[in-house]
Each structure stands twice: as C-alpha cells, then as structure tokens.
Amino acid sequence: MTVDINNAKTRLETKRSELEAQSELSREARTTVELDQQAVGRLSRMDAMQQKAMADAQERTRQHDLVRIEQAERRLREDDYGYCQECGDEIPDARLAIDPMAERCINCA
C-alpha cells in the first residue's frame, strides 16, 4: 500500500479546521465562572463550574490532537506517514481515514 499523500494532507487539514472551529465555539464556555451570590443559586453555580471543567477538558483534548496533527505532518514530510511507529508495518488506509493522526497499527495500538 502506498499512502495517498494528497488525501492524507486533506484529511489532516480538515481535522485541524474542525478542531480549531470547535475550540472557537467553546471559547465562551471556558471563561471563568462568575459567582454572583445574588443572581445564581448554589446548584446553578455548581452546574456552571462543572460545565466549565468539561469544556476545559475538551479543549485539552483538542490541543493534544492539534499536536498529533503536527506530528503526522512531520511524518508526511519525512515519508514515514502510514507506517506503525512501533512495528513498522503499514497502517491500513481505513484506519487512517478514521484517525488521520494514527501512529500505530491496530495490533500495536
């Protein structure tokens, strides 16, 4: 199997765009929770704090995925994309279609 470089680049660019768009959409949810004792009850404040924590966790995952995209782009430049980083076997295109940043084959993952 030979990796279709153009297809791989397109997948990575699409994934990067999706992550950046999601990050922008969730920006407000990640802002500091204002604890106005008069305007919001205790349960509402707790709910707001929990929602912020969840939004922060999702943002950390997105940032991690952006790093994985950069690593995949580096592997593309070095002609190492599409090969398992552990065993060296080819990663099936179906796996790369689902996760274009995949570094390992199914067996090693």
Image (tube, grey):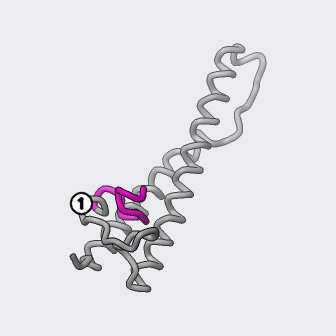
Residue 13 position within the rendered picture, expressed as x and y whole percent measured from the top left: 37, 68
The extreme right residue here reads 37
The extreme left residue here reads 1
Q: Is residue 27 depicted above or below 19 in this figure?
A: above
Segment colored magenta? 97-109
Residue drawn where x is 41% and y is 70% of the image: 87
Name the side, left or right, on which 37 lies relative to 29.
right
Q: Which residue is mark 1?
A: 94
Q: Which residue type carries mark 1?
A: Ala
Name the side, left or right, on which 15 lies relative to 40.
left
**Quadrant of the snapshot with the N terminus:** bottom left
Q: Is residue 60 depicted above or below 71 in this figure?
A: above
Query: Quadrant location of residue 30?
Result: top right
Label 1 crowding class (10 Å Cα cut-off): few <14, some 14-19, many 20+?
A: few
Query: Quadrant location of residue 73?
Result: bottom left
Q: Is residue 33 depicted above or below 64 in this figure?
A: above
Residue 10 position within the rendered picture, expressed as x and y whole percent measured from the top left: 31, 71
Q: Is residue 84 depicted above or below 43 in this figure?
A: below
Residue 62 position within the rendered picture, expressed as x and y whole percent measured from the top left: 52, 53
